[in-house]
Image (cartoon, helix red, strand yellow):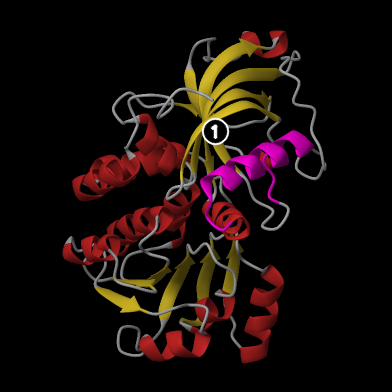
Amino acid sequence: MPQAAWRLDATPIAYPNEILCDVEALNIDSASFRQILAVTEGDEARVRAHVMALVGERGKHHNAVTGSGGMFIGRVREIGAALAGSLTLRPGDRIASLVSLTLTPLRIEAIAGIDMETGRIWMRGTAILFASGLYTKLPEDLPDAVALAVLDVAGAPAQVRRLVSAGQTVAIIGADGKSGMLACAQARERTGPTGRVVGIAPARTAAASLLLEQGYIDEFIEADARDASALLEASAQALPQLADVTINCVNVPGTELGSILITKDEGTVYFFSMSTSFTAAALGAEGVGKDVTMIVGNGYAKGHAETALQTLRDHPALLRFFGERYGAGAATSAPHPVL
């Protein structure tokens, strides 16, 4: 299977059951990009060299430390003969991949630029989607950069929509990130007027303030979820009876036990984070005697792309924020000429 393989053949040829795409940009997943920044000390030239070397060696963007990748946007160049008659897709269509770069054959010819804050990489190269590969056509009503930011975390709001119901108390760890903000909006819709949504992050950022001011969350807890005891103590007033559902959207390891402790017995913890250690989660729950249902963060759910995009469309305050934060350079495929 391509995800388990150490190296993929990224030769730009579309076999009968494949789709060949010209790639315009990558969106590296948050956990992976944070790790890359750490090992390169945040130097853009070193990040560029790191990504080029990684993809050159493995034929895909598969971070060996985090095990995660990201997604791409690009334009369809060729559709294999076995797929051509069964798809609505046509050569020339612009799409976003909805499967991980850890299983996507990828070839980079050149990197044009890197957004060091968002993990977006503008590039020239190719990628291959298999017959089972998920994708969506880029929406016409949203800037590419905004759509890419949303689609990268589309699984989170879709899963929140499934897991949360009216009247529940929901805690969202990492509420001020992309996935966290969309999760807060969905949680607010699902819990209704009788429910309660609590956002958690290490600091009250602009995003956290927006969530509170716009009513997406009822209360904000300033705490580092890696310190489980401190998180539980900080949550005492906001979550006196603990959470029915906890959504973990962080991009750092070590938050498993904190997520479990703030969730009531027989509650649910959804680990959307790719930094999660499921060994730590399972043994941590056992160690503190917590009977909670723990769900693996699946980046895919039926209809997740449209759910995520519609969530943004339905909430103008979030749409403005995403446009300001992620929309830079959205009018072009690269911020400057390819080097």
Would residue 316 be found to the left or right of residue 42 on screen?
Answer: left
Find the magenta span and give its range: 41-63
Label 1, on which residue?
Answer: 72
Q: Residue at x 34, y 89 (%)?
A: 240
Q: Position of residue 206 (x, y in %)?
A: 25, 61
* 124 vs 302: above or below: above
Instruction: Give yes or no for residue 328 being in the magenta stretch.
Output: no
Rendered image quadrant of residue 103: top right
The quarter in which the N terminus is drawn is top right
Neighbor class of circle 1 (other Cα within 10 Å; few <14, some 14-19, many 20+) is many
Looking at the picture, which amino acid does disc 1 mark? Phe
219 vs 9: above or below: below
Residue 226 location, x and y as percent?
52, 78
Res 6 seen here: yes
Residue nearest the observer in this picture, 100 or 245: 100
Image quadrant containing the C terminus: top right
Left-right relation of 181 to 119? left
In the depicted view, which residue is nearer to us: 90 or 148? Answer: 148
In this orientation, does residue 168 appear? Answer: no
| Residue sitting nearer the eye, 272 or 326 | 326
Q: Quadrant of residue 5?
A: top right
Along the viewing direction, whichever of 280 and 24 lies nearer the viewer: 24
Residue 43 is one of the magenta-drawn residues: yes
From the top left corner, tell me how far across and down residue 255 is, in percent: 55, 74
Provide the secondary structure element on which disc 1 rests: strand
What main secondary structure does the magenta stretch of the protein show?
Answer: helix
Residue 253 in picture, x, y percent from top left: 59, 69
Location of residue 202 by image quarter: bottom left
> How many numbered markers are drawn?
1
Query: What residue is drawn where x is 34% and y is 32%?
Result: 329
Left or right: residue 332 compared with residue 111? left
